[in-house]
Amino acid sequence: MKIGELSKTSGCSVQTIRYYEREGLLSDPERSEGNFRLYSDKSLKELEFVKHCRSLDIPLNDIKRLIELKNKPEESCSSVNKLIKQQLDLVNKRMKELKALKNELQQMASTCNSDNTIGACGIIKSLDS
Amino acid sequence: MKIGELSKTSGCSVQTIRYYEREGLLSDPERSEGNFRLYSDKSLKELEFVKHCRSLDIPLNDIKRLIELKNKPEESCSSVNKLIKQQLDLVNKRMKELKALKNELQQMASTCNSDNTIGACGIIKSLDS
DNA sequence: CTTGACTCTATAGTTACTATAGATTTTATA
DNA sequence: TATAAAATCTATAGTAACTATAGAGTCAAG
Protein backbone atom coordinates (compact mmCIF):
# COMPACT_ATOMS: atom_id res chain seq x y z
CA MET A 1 0.00 0.00 0.00
CA LYS A 2 1.00 3.60 -0.52
CA ILE A 3 1.42 6.16 2.21
CA GLY A 4 -2.11 7.53 1.92
CA GLU A 5 -3.62 4.15 2.63
CA LEU A 6 -1.26 3.50 5.52
CA SER A 7 -2.26 6.88 6.86
CA LYS A 8 -5.93 5.99 6.75
CA THR A 9 -5.63 2.52 8.24
CA SER A 10 -3.27 3.67 10.99
CA GLY A 11 -4.81 7.03 11.78
CA CYS A 12 -1.42 8.75 11.50
CA SER A 13 -1.10 11.69 9.16
CA VAL A 14 1.02 11.27 6.06
CA GLN A 15 3.50 13.85 7.31
CA THR A 16 3.81 12.12 10.64
CA ILE A 17 4.61 8.82 8.97
CA ARG A 18 7.32 10.43 6.90
CA TYR A 19 8.58 12.16 10.02
CA TYR A 20 8.80 8.90 11.97
CA GLU A 21 10.73 7.42 9.08
CA ARG A 22 13.22 10.28 9.09
CA GLU A 23 13.64 9.87 12.83
CA GLY A 24 14.47 6.21 12.40
CA LEU A 25 11.34 4.83 14.09
CA LEU A 26 10.16 3.04 10.98
CA SER A 27 12.29 0.99 8.65
CA ASP A 28 12.79 2.43 5.19
CA PRO A 29 9.98 1.25 2.95
CA GLU A 30 10.29 -0.15 -0.54
CA ARG A 31 9.83 2.34 -3.34
CA SER A 32 7.80 2.12 -6.53
CA GLU A 33 9.17 3.00 -9.97
CA GLY A 34 8.06 6.57 -9.45
CA ASN A 35 9.68 6.72 -6.00
CA PHE A 36 6.46 6.33 -4.01
CA ARG A 37 6.74 4.58 -0.64
CA LEU A 38 5.29 1.06 -0.61
CA TYR A 39 4.27 -0.45 2.70
CA SER A 40 3.55 -3.96 3.89
CA ASP A 41 1.57 -5.28 6.85
CA LYS A 42 4.85 -5.41 8.75
CA SER A 43 5.18 -1.64 8.26
CA LEU A 44 1.71 -1.18 9.69
CA LYS A 45 2.71 -3.23 12.75
CA GLU A 46 5.77 -1.07 13.23
CA LEU A 47 3.73 2.07 13.01
CA GLU A 48 1.16 0.75 15.44
CA PHE A 49 3.87 -0.03 17.95
CA VAL A 50 5.04 3.56 17.74
CA LYS A 51 1.50 4.86 18.00
CA HIS A 52 0.79 2.77 21.05
CA CYS A 53 3.95 4.03 22.74
CA ARG A 54 3.05 7.61 21.86
CA SER A 55 -0.42 7.16 23.32
CA LEU A 56 1.44 6.45 26.56
CA ASP A 57 3.37 9.69 26.07
CA ILE A 58 6.64 7.87 25.70
CA PRO A 59 9.11 10.22 23.94
CA LEU A 60 10.32 9.30 20.47
CA ASN A 61 13.85 8.72 21.70
CA ASP A 62 12.67 6.20 24.24
CA ILE A 63 10.54 4.51 21.63
CA LYS A 64 13.64 4.19 19.51
CA ARG A 65 15.38 2.47 22.39
CA LEU A 66 12.42 0.15 22.92
CA ILE A 67 12.55 -0.83 19.25
CA GLU A 68 16.25 -1.60 19.50
CA LEU A 69 15.63 -3.66 22.63
CA LYS A 70 12.79 -5.50 20.95
CA ASN A 71 15.28 -6.72 18.41
CA LYS A 72 17.46 -8.31 21.09
CA PRO A 73 15.01 -10.82 22.58
CA GLU A 74 17.70 -12.70 24.52
CA GLU A 75 18.76 -9.71 26.61
CA SER A 76 17.38 -8.85 30.02
CA CYS A 77 14.24 -6.82 29.98
CA SER A 78 15.23 -4.79 33.03
CA SER A 79 15.92 -1.73 30.88
CA VAL A 80 12.48 -1.97 29.37
CA ASN A 81 11.05 -2.19 32.83
CA LYS A 82 13.08 0.78 34.00
CA LEU A 83 11.91 2.87 31.09
CA ILE A 84 8.26 2.15 31.80
CA LYS A 85 8.70 2.86 35.48
CA GLN A 86 10.33 6.19 34.67
CA GLN A 87 7.40 7.02 32.46
CA LEU A 88 5.05 6.12 35.29
CA ASP A 89 6.95 8.38 37.66
CA LEU A 90 6.63 11.23 35.21
CA VAL A 91 2.91 10.69 34.85
CA ASN A 92 2.46 10.62 38.61
CA LYS A 93 4.44 13.79 39.03
CA ARG A 94 2.44 15.56 36.36
CA MET A 95 -0.80 14.41 37.94
CA LYS A 96 0.17 15.94 41.25
CA GLU A 97 0.95 19.22 39.54
CA LEU A 98 -2.34 19.17 37.70
CA LYS A 99 -4.27 18.58 40.90
CA ALA A 100 -2.68 21.66 42.43
CA LEU A 101 -3.44 23.64 39.28
CA LYS A 102 -7.02 22.52 39.32
CA ASN A 103 -7.47 23.59 42.90
CA GLU A 104 -6.13 27.04 42.34
CA LEU A 105 -8.08 27.55 39.14
CA GLN A 106 -11.32 26.44 40.78
CA GLN A 107 -10.73 28.74 43.68
CA MET A 108 -10.10 31.60 41.30
CA ALA A 109 -13.13 30.88 39.17
CA SER A 110 -15.30 30.93 42.26
CA THR A 111 -14.18 34.45 43.20
CA CYS A 112 -15.56 35.90 39.97
CA ASN A 113 -19.20 36.77 39.66
CA SER A 114 -19.54 37.58 36.04
CA ASP A 115 -21.38 40.91 36.20
CA ASN A 116 -18.42 42.54 37.89
CA THR A 117 -15.93 44.82 36.27
CA ILE A 118 -12.32 43.85 35.78
CA GLY A 119 -11.31 46.36 38.39
CA ALA A 120 -13.20 44.39 40.99
CA CYS A 121 -12.48 40.96 39.58
CA GLY A 122 -11.35 38.41 42.11
CA ILE A 123 -9.51 36.46 39.47
CA ILE A 124 -7.25 39.30 38.49
CA LYS A 125 -6.71 40.08 42.15
CA SER A 126 -5.59 36.57 42.94
CA LEU A 127 -3.28 36.51 39.92
CA ASP A 128 -1.75 39.72 41.17
CA SER A 129 -0.86 38.37 44.57
CA MET B 1 18.19 46.79 39.45
CA LYS B 2 19.82 45.03 36.54
CA ILE B 3 18.56 41.90 34.88
CA GLY B 4 20.72 39.56 36.95
CA GLU B 5 19.20 40.80 40.18
CA LEU B 6 15.68 40.64 38.79
CA SER B 7 16.44 37.11 37.72
CA LYS B 8 17.51 36.13 41.23
CA THR B 9 14.66 37.80 43.07
CA SER B 10 12.06 36.50 40.66
CA GLY B 11 13.44 33.05 40.02
CA CYS B 12 13.16 33.55 36.26
CA SER B 13 16.25 32.99 34.15
CA VAL B 14 17.81 36.01 32.48
CA GLN B 15 17.00 34.64 29.04
CA THR B 16 13.40 34.02 30.00
CA ILE B 17 13.01 37.62 31.16
CA ARG B 18 14.39 38.90 27.87
CA TYR B 19 12.13 36.46 26.05
CA TYR B 20 9.03 37.70 27.87
CA GLU B 21 10.02 41.24 26.97
CA ARG B 22 10.35 40.36 23.29
CA GLU B 23 6.95 38.69 23.43
CA GLY B 24 5.41 41.83 24.85
CA LEU B 25 4.56 40.43 28.29
CA LEU B 26 6.76 42.92 30.11
CA SER B 27 6.96 46.61 29.41
CA ASP B 28 10.24 47.81 27.95
CA PRO B 29 12.61 48.65 30.79
CA GLU B 30 14.72 51.76 31.15
CA ARG B 31 18.26 51.46 29.89
CA SER B 32 21.52 52.55 31.49
CA GLU B 33 24.19 54.54 29.67
CA GLY B 34 25.78 51.30 28.58
CA ASN B 35 22.42 49.92 27.37
CA PHE B 36 21.83 47.62 30.33
CA ARG B 37 18.21 46.98 31.30
CA LEU B 38 17.16 48.76 34.51
CA TYR B 39 14.18 47.43 36.42
CA SER B 40 11.94 48.84 39.11
CA ASP B 41 9.70 47.17 41.65
CA LYS B 42 6.88 47.64 39.18
CA SER B 43 8.80 45.49 36.69
CA LEU B 44 9.13 42.81 39.35
CA LYS B 45 5.37 42.90 39.90
CA GLU B 46 4.78 42.52 36.19
CA LEU B 47 7.10 39.57 36.01
CA GLU B 48 5.49 37.93 39.00
CA PHE B 49 2.08 38.26 37.41
CA VAL B 50 3.40 36.43 34.36
CA LYS B 51 5.07 33.80 36.53
CA HIS B 52 1.92 33.19 38.48
CA CYS B 53 -0.08 32.74 35.29
CA ARG B 54 2.54 30.40 33.89
CA SER B 55 2.45 28.34 37.06
CA LEU B 56 -1.20 27.79 36.16
CA ASP B 57 -0.10 26.67 32.69
CA ILE B 58 -1.82 29.61 31.05
CA PRO B 59 -0.28 30.10 27.58
CA LEU B 60 1.70 33.26 26.92
CA ASN B 61 -0.87 34.52 24.45
CA ASP B 62 -3.63 34.26 27.02
CA ILE B 63 -1.43 35.98 29.58
CA LYS B 64 -1.00 38.79 27.11
CA ARG B 65 -4.77 39.09 26.87
CA LEU B 66 -5.09 39.08 30.64
CA ILE B 67 -2.58 41.91 30.87
CA GLU B 68 -4.52 43.95 28.34
CA LEU B 69 -7.73 43.29 30.23
CA LYS B 70 -6.10 44.25 33.51
CA ASN B 71 -5.51 47.66 32.02
CA LYS B 72 -9.20 48.17 31.34
CA PRO B 73 -10.62 47.98 34.87
CA GLU B 74 -14.02 49.35 33.86
CA GLU B 75 -14.82 46.56 31.40
CA SER B 76 -16.70 43.41 32.25
CA CYS B 77 -14.58 40.64 33.62
CA SER B 78 -16.56 37.93 31.85
CA SER B 79 -13.75 37.37 29.39
CA VAL B 80 -11.32 36.87 32.23
CA ASN B 81 -13.69 34.40 33.74
CA LYS B 82 -14.09 32.59 30.45
CA LEU B 83 -10.36 32.30 30.01
CA ILE B 84 -9.89 30.78 33.45
CA LYS B 85 -12.74 28.36 32.93
CA GLN B 86 -11.24 27.24 29.64
CA GLN B 87 -7.97 26.66 31.40
CA LEU B 88 -9.76 24.62 34.01
CA ASP B 89 -11.43 22.52 31.32
CA LEU B 90 -8.05 21.85 29.77
CA VAL B 91 -6.59 20.79 33.09
CA ASN B 92 -9.51 18.47 33.74
CA LYS B 93 -9.19 16.91 30.32
CA ARG B 94 -5.49 16.37 30.75
CA MET B 95 -6.05 14.81 34.14
CA LYS B 96 -8.42 12.27 32.68
CA GLU B 97 -5.90 11.38 30.02
CA LEU B 98 -3.18 10.99 32.59
CA LYS B 99 -5.30 8.71 34.71
CA ALA B 100 -5.79 6.42 31.74
CA LEU B 101 -2.07 6.54 31.00
CA LYS B 102 -1.24 5.71 34.57
CA ASN B 103 -3.51 2.71 34.57
CA GLU B 104 -2.04 1.25 31.45
CA LEU B 105 1.53 1.89 32.53
CA GLN B 106 0.92 0.29 35.91
CA GLN B 107 -0.64 -2.70 34.29
CA MET B 108 2.32 -3.01 31.98
CA ALA B 109 4.87 -2.65 34.73
CA SER B 110 3.19 -5.40 36.68
CA THR B 111 3.55 -7.88 33.82
CA CYS B 112 7.32 -7.60 33.87
CA ASN B 113 9.32 -9.61 36.34
CA SER B 114 12.72 -8.21 35.90
CA ASP B 115 14.77 -11.39 35.51
CA ASN B 116 13.01 -12.22 32.27
CA THR B 117 14.44 -11.79 28.82
CA ILE B 118 13.06 -9.25 26.40
CA GLY B 119 11.68 -12.07 24.29
CA ALA B 120 9.40 -13.03 27.16
CA CYS B 121 8.75 -9.54 28.45
CA GLY B 122 5.14 -8.73 29.16
CA ILE B 123 5.74 -5.05 28.59
CA ILE B 124 6.94 -5.45 25.05
CA LYS B 125 4.09 -7.88 24.39
CA SER B 126 1.50 -5.43 25.55
CA LEU B 127 3.02 -2.64 23.51
CA ASP B 128 2.88 -4.91 20.49
CA SER B 129 -0.81 -5.59 20.78
C1' DC C 1 44.90 48.73 33.64
C1' DT C 2 43.51 44.46 33.22
C1' DT C 3 40.84 40.57 34.62
C1' DG C 4 36.54 38.59 35.45
C1' DA C 5 31.71 39.00 35.92
C1' DC C 6 27.87 40.73 33.80
C1' DT C 7 25.23 42.25 30.00
C1' DC C 8 24.04 42.99 25.07
C1' DT C 9 21.96 41.13 20.39
C1' DA C 10 21.19 37.63 17.23
C1' DT C 11 20.75 33.05 16.19
C1' DA C 12 20.11 28.06 16.69
C1' DG C 13 18.40 24.11 19.27
C1' DT C 14 14.67 21.57 21.81
C1' DT C 15 10.02 18.16 20.99
C1' DA C 16 6.73 16.22 18.09
C1' DC C 17 4.59 17.45 14.92
C1' DT C 18 1.93 20.41 11.14
C1' DA C 19 1.92 23.23 7.07
C1' DT C 20 3.63 24.95 2.90
C1' DA C 21 5.90 25.36 -1.82
C1' DG C 22 7.11 23.56 -5.91
C1' DA C 23 7.99 19.50 -8.54
C1' DT C 24 6.76 14.86 -10.07
C1' DT C 25 3.77 10.77 -10.66
C1' DT C 26 -0.36 8.43 -11.01
C1' DT C 27 -5.30 7.97 -11.81
C1' DA C 28 -9.64 9.38 -13.73
C1' DT C 29 -12.29 11.72 -16.97
C1' DA C 30 -13.42 13.73 -21.66
C1' DT D 1 -4.98 10.14 -26.13
C1' DA D 2 -4.90 14.43 -23.89
C1' DT D 3 -5.47 16.59 -19.84
C1' DA D 4 -7.04 17.58 -15.39
C1' DA D 5 -7.22 16.17 -10.65
C1' DA D 6 -5.40 13.63 -6.90
C1' DA D 7 -1.60 11.71 -4.66
C1' DT D 8 3.03 11.71 -3.74
C1' DC D 9 7.87 13.51 -3.48
C1' DT D 10 11.64 16.56 -1.03
C1' DA D 11 12.95 20.44 1.46
C1' DT D 12 11.92 23.98 4.41
C1' DA D 13 9.51 26.80 7.87
C1' DG D 14 6.31 27.30 11.64
C1' DT D 15 4.44 25.97 16.35
C1' DA D 16 5.19 26.84 22.12
C1' DA D 17 8.02 28.24 25.57
C1' DC D 18 11.93 28.29 26.49
C1' DT D 19 17.32 27.19 26.74
C1' DA D 20 21.93 27.60 24.94
C1' DT D 21 25.50 29.58 22.30
C1' DA D 22 28.63 33.01 19.93
C1' DG D 23 30.77 37.13 19.76
C1' DA D 24 30.91 41.76 21.31
C1' DG D 25 30.49 45.41 24.66
C1' DT D 26 30.28 47.26 29.73
C1' DC D 27 31.41 47.60 34.46
C1' DA D 28 33.60 46.84 39.19
C1' DA D 29 37.57 45.26 41.85
C1' DG D 30 42.37 44.66 42.66
Image (cartoon, coloured by chain):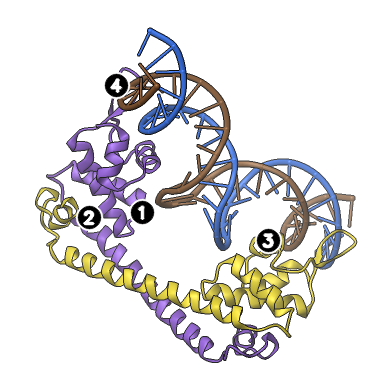
Chain colours: A purple, B yellow, C brown, D blue
Q: What residue is drawn where x is 57% and y is 91%?
A: A113
Circles 1, 4 touching at the beta carbon (< 8 Å): no
First of labels 2, 4 by sequence position: 4
Cα separation between marks 3 and 2: 41 Å
Q: Is residue A26 left or right of residue B35?
A: left
User: What number is the disc on residue A59?
Assistant: 1
A37 shown above or below B7: above
* Whether marks 2 and 4 lie on the same chain: yes
B70 shown above or below B18: below
Q: Where is residue B38 in the image (x, y as percent from the top left)?
A: 81, 69
| Mark whose residue sits in front, 1 or 3 | 3
Q: Position of residue A58 (x, y in %)?
A: 32, 56
* Whether marks 3 and 2 lie on the same chain: no
- Three-letter code for the amino acid on which mark 4 is drawn: Ser
Q: In this view, does B109 lie to the left or right of B57?
A: left
| Mark whose residue sits in front, 2 or 1 | 1
B120 shown above or below B87: above
Q: Identify the secondary structure beneath mark 3.
A: loop
Q: Where is residue B75 in the image (x, y as percent from the top left)?
A: 70, 82
User: What number is the disc on residue B23?
Assistant: 3
Report the residue marked by disc 4. Answer: A32
Mark yes or no: residue A66 visible: no
- Mark 2 crowd level (few <14, some 14–19, many ≥20, 10 Å Cα): many
First of labels 1, 4 by sequence position: 4
First of labels 2, 1 by sequence position: 1
Q: The N terminus of chain B lies in which quarter of the figure?
A: bottom right
